[in-house]
Image (cartoon, rainbow, N blue to C red):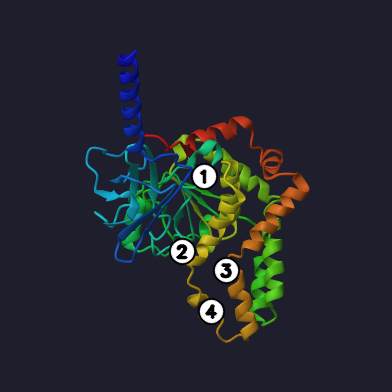
């Protein structure tokens, strides 16, 4: 009897020791990454309850493959931050964080990788269905690719995109796909909205901030009806083919088509409205309106402010679109099914291609 209690006590002590070496009762974790102008990565994490132990950090230029024998850094979890120089400024890097062997997270800098194209960023790292995350390095969104520097052309070549989806006609694009080593470019110009009429109002000096908000709402509303639907039906057909990845979505200033495409893609993956709005307003962190304002510097102040408000991604514009879909279709999901022909089979395939379970090592 005494021997049985002795062994039972030993097992209990060993179990408690093993559990204490791990991160006990992890309810939530938030991991982020950014990159400075000097190309230094800043990785931050916040684990609840408070983390105890080491965080081993591994680096790769492929988010699906990490050499876990050689960490680039081992940091005390309580620090909550690590600073890492980039080994190659021409390559995009991903990081695997091993929290004391208990759970892992994959993270990357969402933006600032390509600097000569406006708002080039990755749609990875958002929370989708079944506690999965959207995969890094699969879908990028950007402004036009006409102004790429030679360095940024090489950076894009290094991420090896297979497909570019262009919001414009072929004749409007000043770059050559061969410069980016991309064979598959799909041109899907959007013509539901009369942009020229707005431009004319701006240059005639007859454009106010109130009218700007109305214009933006009409612009986005036009994208969920009429011929615009076929554009997004085609988009989902492209997303279901594994051979098309990685994909770059390109539109002027990264707005309009990209905003709605990101909304539909993220919603189809089960990403919450809050994170969809976060993706929409992310552009404001990097948008430089100086060049646009310079072009209209001769116009009245209220007109310049109205133009600036259009270029600024306002949370309310996207929430108005979402609310319209909810009122007309009961849910975004129902809109995706009824209007964009997103069948269950298509959705399953997109989930397989674009979601990853990164929780346990």
Q: Which residue does the image show at 70% across and 80% down from the upper left?
A: 206
Which element carries disc 2, helix, strand or loop? loop
Left or right of 165? Residue 264 is right
Residue 195 percent across, percent down from the top left: 65, 66
Dots 1 and 3: beta carbons under 8 Å? Answer: no
Q: Where does the C terminus fall, quadrant-wise?
A: top left
Give the labeled residue for mark 2.
118
Q: Residues within 10 Å of mark 2 (few under 14, many from 20)?
A: many
**C-alpha separation, residue under disc 3 versus residue under disc 2:** 13 Å
Q: State which tag comes first along the sequence, 2 or 4.
A: 2
Which element carries disc 1, helix, strand or loop? loop
Q: State which tag comes first along the sequence, 4 or 3.
A: 4
Give the labeled residue for mark 3.
312
Q: Quadrant of residue 335?
A: top right
Q: State which tag comes first along the sequence, 1 or 4.
A: 1
Residue 215 percent across, percent down from the top left: 69, 67
Residue 359 appears anywhere in the view: yes
**C-alpha separation, residue under disc 1 versus residue under disc 3:** 25 Å
**Which of labels 1 and 3 is toward the front?**
1
- Disc sitting over residue 293 in the figure: 4
Q: Quadrant of residue 360?
A: top left
Give the labeled residue for mark 1.
127
Q: State which tag comes first along the sequence, 3 or 2.
A: 2
Which element carries disc 4, helix, strand or loop? helix
Q: In this view of the protein, which residue sits in the foreground, 44 or 127?
A: 44
**C-alpha separation, residue under disc 1 versus residue under disc 4:** 36 Å
């Amino acid at each position: 009897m005494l021997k049985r209690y002795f062994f039972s006590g030993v097992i209990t002590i060993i179990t408690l020791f093993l559990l204490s070496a791990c991160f006990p009762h992890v309810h939530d974790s938030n991991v982020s990454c950014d990159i400075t102008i000097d190309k230094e990565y800043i990785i931050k994490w916040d684990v609840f309850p408070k983390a105890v132990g080491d965080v081993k950090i591994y680096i790769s230029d492929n988010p699906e493959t990490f050499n876990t024998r050689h960490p680039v850094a081992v940091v005390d979890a309580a620090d909550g931050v690590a600073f890492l120089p980039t080994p190659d400024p021409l390559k995009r890097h991903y990081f695997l964080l091993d929290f004391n062997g208990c759970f892992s997270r994959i993270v990357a800098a969402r933006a600032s990788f390509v600097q000569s194209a406006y708002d080039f960023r990755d749609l990875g790292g958002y929370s989708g269905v079944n506690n999965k995350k959207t995969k890094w390095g699969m879908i990028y969104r950007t402004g036009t690719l006409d102004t790429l520097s030679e360095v940024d052309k090489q950076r894009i070549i290094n991420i090896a995109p297979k497909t570019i989806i262009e919001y414009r006609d072929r004749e409007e694009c000043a770059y050559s796909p061969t410069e980016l080593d991309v064979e598959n470019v799909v041109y899907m110009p959007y013509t539901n909205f009369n942009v020229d009429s707005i431009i004319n109002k701006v240059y005639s000096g007859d454009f106010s901030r109130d009218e700007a908000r109305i214009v933006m709402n009409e612009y986005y509303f036009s994208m969920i009806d009429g011929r615009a639907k076929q554009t997004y039906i085609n988009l989902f057909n492209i997303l279901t083919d594994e051979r098309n990845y990685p994909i770059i979505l390109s539109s002027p200033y990264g707005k309009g088509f990209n905003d709605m495409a990101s909304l539909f893609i993220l919603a189809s993956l089960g990403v919450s409205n809050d994170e969809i709005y976060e993706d929409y307003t992310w552009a404001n962190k990097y948008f430089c309106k100086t060049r646009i304002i310079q072009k209209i510097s001769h116009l009245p102040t209220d007109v310049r402010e109205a133009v600036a408000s259009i270029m600024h991604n306002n949370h309310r514009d996207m929430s108005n679109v979402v609310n319209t879909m909810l009122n007309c279709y009961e849910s975004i999901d129902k809109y995706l099914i009824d209007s964009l022909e997103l069948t269950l089979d298509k959705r399953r395939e997109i989930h397989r291609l674009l979601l990853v379970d990164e929780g346990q090592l």
